[in-house]
Image (cartoon, helix red, strand yellow):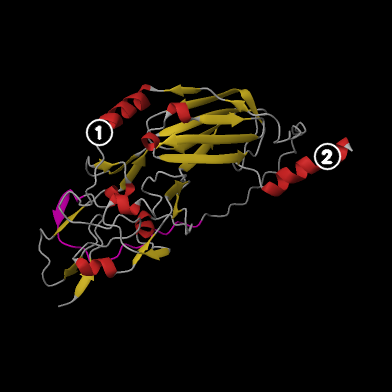
Amino acid sequence: MPSVRCYNKGCGKVFDTEDNGDKSCRYHPGEPYFHDAKKQWTCCKKYSTDFSDFLILEGCTVGPHNPDKPRAVEEPKPKVEIDPTPPPKPIVTKPPIERPSSDAPLQKLSPQVLSSLKKSLESLRKEGSSTSGDSENGVKNCHNSGCKAVYHGIDSDTETCFYHPGVPVFHEGCKYWSCCQRKTTEFEAFLDQPGCTSGRHSWTKEEAATINAMVVTPTTSQCRFDWFQMSGNITLSVYAKNIIPESVDVRCNEVFLNVSLVYDGGKALFERGFNLYGVINPSVSKLTLTATKAEVVMQKAEACSWPTLEVTSSKAKGSEESEDIDEQ
């Protein structure tokens, strides 16, 4: 009896092609949708804030299994058009502001705590921690990111688990894991990426917490962050749930930003410095804390576009060395 894998979204089971009825498969006909901390399907109202739980959400539609692997969407090649008009004259711009030293004193930003975070922390204090490793349908799955193994008995403990110890990153259409950074634009291809690290299965979230950055650990850990810009400011978002306001220490000068915060109700710590690409005005920068993230809004010292958030270390070092030479 030939067995093949089902390519319906949310299924992924191996099935017998000779036993494939109209009610054999439960799947999601819609597309994955990510907004703030919620991860859901466009076809139903089911959602999760945990990426591992989102991958095992039961389908909302019943139908036969699909043995056909979806084809990658080919982007049309842009047509090259010849512009007969002469090129515009170069615009004379003002010389850029001289880059200050990153060793200048840092100014601490006072956080604005929104009501959503206050309510979330209050709710967290009333809840007990869950230790169950079973999904909603009673099936025990491996909680390591990127692993789709299901517990079938004691023999499952001896299997090798291939997983991603990092976190998923979605930025400007690219989807990849922070641990291996194999980028793809297709969500299905992202889910099918084999793990880059081998180890043992984790049948509970507590076990996965010791090796997996997707599960919060009580030690220093990584957080996903993203940024965008407008004509006059830069906004940095650090995605961390249930931040402890008293622990937040965000400081900056004109070219450097340091973020330190404790999140997940006090179980995890995030610390990172950002060597900013351009120059900002620290005195008017703002810090806002919500239930799912910390947001830093920095005003640009000059209205120009930043190609990246951070400057390369060689450029920053060269700028500081030139200042030392001038002083001598």
Residue 252 in percent (x, y) is at: 61, 30
Instruction: Give the amino acid at mark 1.
Output: Glu
Q: Is residue 259 above or below residue 7?
A: above
Residue 179 in percent (x, y) is at: 47, 56
Residue tagged 2: 324
Do the numbered discs 2 and 1 sit on residues whose CB atoms are within 8 Å? no
Instruction: Choose between 227 and 272: the one closer to the eye.
Output: 272
Tag 1, which secondary structure? loop
Q: In this rendering, would 208 be left or right of 293?
A: left
Q: Residue at x 16, y 50 (%)?
A: 61
Instruction: Give the amino acid at mark 2.
Output: Asp
Q: Which residues are magenta?
A: 58-77
Residue 249 in percent (x, y) is at: 53, 30
Instruction: Choose between 312 and 22: the one closer to the eye.
Output: 312
Instruction: Choose between 191 and 143: the one closer to the eye.
Output: 143
Q: Quadrant of residue 278?
A: top right
Q: In this rendering, would 35 be left or right of 220?
A: left
Q: In this rendering, would 66 be left or right of 246?
A: left
Residue tagged 1: 127
**Which quadrant would the N terminus be assigned to in this image?**
bottom left
Q: Residue at x 41, y 56 (%)?
A: 165
Q: Sequence order check: which comes first, mark 2 or mark 1?
A: 1
Q: Residue at x 65, y 39 (%)?
A: 277
Q: In the rendered picture of this protein, how many numbered marks are placed on residues?
A: 2
